[in-house]
Every structure is written in structure tokens, then in C-alpha cells.
Amino acid sequence: YNEKFINKKINIVLMFDPIRSRIYYPNQNTCEYESFASEIRNYSINKNKKKGIYTLDLNPYFLKAYNKDKKKFEFEIDFHWNEYGHKIAAESLIDYLEKKINY
């Protein structure tokens, strides 16, 4: 896959992790930290897109995966992605790039 994307001059994509607690608990009130983190995240996504930087918001991909499988994306002991989280992120990146270069 890399060669296809490099030939199209796509060599960097910024990927934005969703606020996962909002995926797991969509009907709960969010804390002040989540609201602030969400504002920063959305600002960063929009700013990068306006500058023409390839920007991938993982939220729709993670939301779809969670609604389907009900599996969490991080380890129980910390918030780093587990194997499943990395799998969804990789599949999302491939899907995003294929759409961007019209395969």
C-alpha cells in the first residue's frame, strides 16, 4: 500500500483519536475536561483541514466499530490503544486513503 500513497504525494496523515468515553457512554453528561478536550480536538481537526493537511478523524470509525462489537480500544490499565484499537485505526487509515486517492 505505501507505494500507491507515496506516488500520490501523500506521506503524512494526522489521525485524531476520539474522546472514547463519549463512544462508550454516549448518554452520560461529560465532565469539564472532556468538553475542553473535545473543543481542542475539533479546533485542531478543522485548522489542519483548512491548511490542506490530510486529517483523519477516527471518531466515526471507532463509533461504528464499538456499536458493532462493543469492544473497548484501550488496555484496562491505561488509555493506550490495545490490539483492537490499532486494528481499527489501521483499517480506518486505509479506508481514508483509498477514498482520498479514488481507488
Image (tube, rainbow, N blue to C red):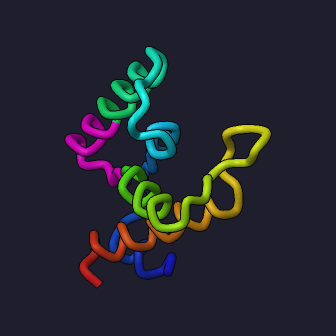
The extreme bottom residue here reads 103
Residue shown at 28% from the left, 75% from the top: 101
Residue 55 within the segment the image draws in magenta: yes
- The image position of residue 90, as x and y in percent, is 54, 67
- The image position of residue 93, as x and y in percent, is 45, 65
The extreme top residue here reads 32
Residue 63 within the segment the image draws in magenta: no
The extreme right residue here reads 77
Residue shown at 33% from the left, 54% from the top: 54
Residue nearest the viewer, comparing 53 with 86: 86
- The image position of residue 45, as x and y in percent, is 32, 39
Quadrant in which residue 95 is drawn: bottom left
Residue shown at 33% from the left, 73% from the top: 8
Residue nearest the viewer, comparing 49 with 91: 91
> Residue 85, relative to residue 101: is it above or below?
above
> Residue 84, relative to residue 5: is it above or below?
above
Exactly how many numbered labels are in the figure?
A: 0
Residue nearest the viewer, comparing 38 with 7: 38
Magenta residues, start to end: 45-56
Residue shown at 39% from the left, 22% from the top: 35
- The image position of residue 62, as x and y in percent, is 46, 56
Residue nearest the viewer, comparing 54 with 72: 72
Q: Is residue 66 left or right of residue 95?
A: right
The extreme left residue here reads 50
Q: What quarter of the picture does the C terminus occupy?
A: bottom left
